[in-house]
Amino acid sequence: MDNPDILTFYLTSKDDIIALPKAQEQDLLVLDKACNSKWFGVKVGTFKGKDFIPEHALALSEIIQKSLPALDLSKSEALLFLKKESFDLPAATAKGWTLARHQGLNLGWMKVLPNRMNNYLPPERRIRMEL
């Protein structure tokens, strides 16, 4: 998103961060109170100690910053990512939170470490069939 000023951020009791569009904020808060719904806006991430863990919903949302670190995957790498299987990353891949992309589409988050990569694709989203 090129203009983060159109969002309002809330910290929930579970330390989750939720982003709401400012233009709809009051309506969503009224609906939340009336319906007791806890699923509105975009779940951005969670604080765990000093670390921030981004949510899968953020990776797939329209509010994601285009300038965040991302790695474009080949078709075979993208399928391995979606199966939560490991594959080798290019040596020059920056360490830290990185978006996995294929043909410009965000697939999810991975955390690149010095000697490996952790795949943060939610288990219920993974491909289970043989390819």
Image (cartoon, rainbow, N blue to C red):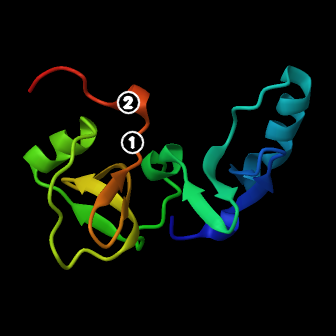
Q: Position of residue 121 (x, y in %)?
A: 39, 42
Task: Find the distance from the CA under tag 2 to the CA under tag 1.
Answer: 7 Å
Q: Position of residue 64 (x, y in %)?
A: 49, 59
Q: Amino acid at mark 1?
A: Leu
Q: Is residue 84 above or below residue 9?
A: above
Q: Residue at x 84, y 21 (%)?
A: 35
Q: Residues within 10 Å of mark 1 (few under 14, many from 20)?
A: some
Q: Is residue 127 above or below residue 11?
A: above
Q: Residue at x 48, y 45 (%)?
A: 56
Q: Residue at x 76, y 51 (%)?
A: 15
Per the image, the residue denoted by label 1 is: 121
Q: Secondary structure at mark 2?
A: helix
Please tell me the numbered disc located at residue 24. Answer: none
Instruction: Tally the marks.
Output: 2
Q: Is residue 89 above or below residue 59?
A: below
Q: Nearer the viewer, residue 44 or 111?
A: 111
Please tell me the numbered disc located at residue 125. Answer: 2
Residue 80 falls in image quadrant:
top left
Residue 111 left/right relative to 49: left
Q: Quadrant of the C terminus?
A: top left
Residue 85 left/right relative to 42: left
Q: Secondary structure at mark 1?
A: loop
Q: Are marks 2 and 1 in contact (CB under 8 Å)?
A: yes
Q: Residues within 10 Å of mark 2 (few under 14, many from 20)?
A: few
Residue 110 left/right relative to 33: left
Q: Amino acid at mark 2?
A: Arg
Q: Position of residue 50 (x, y in %)?
A: 68, 69
Q: Nearer the viewer, residue 60 or 111?
A: 111
Q: Nearer the viewer, residue 49 or 67?
A: 49
Q: Is residue 29 above or below residue 97?
A: above
Q: Residue at x 14, y 49 (%)?
A: 77
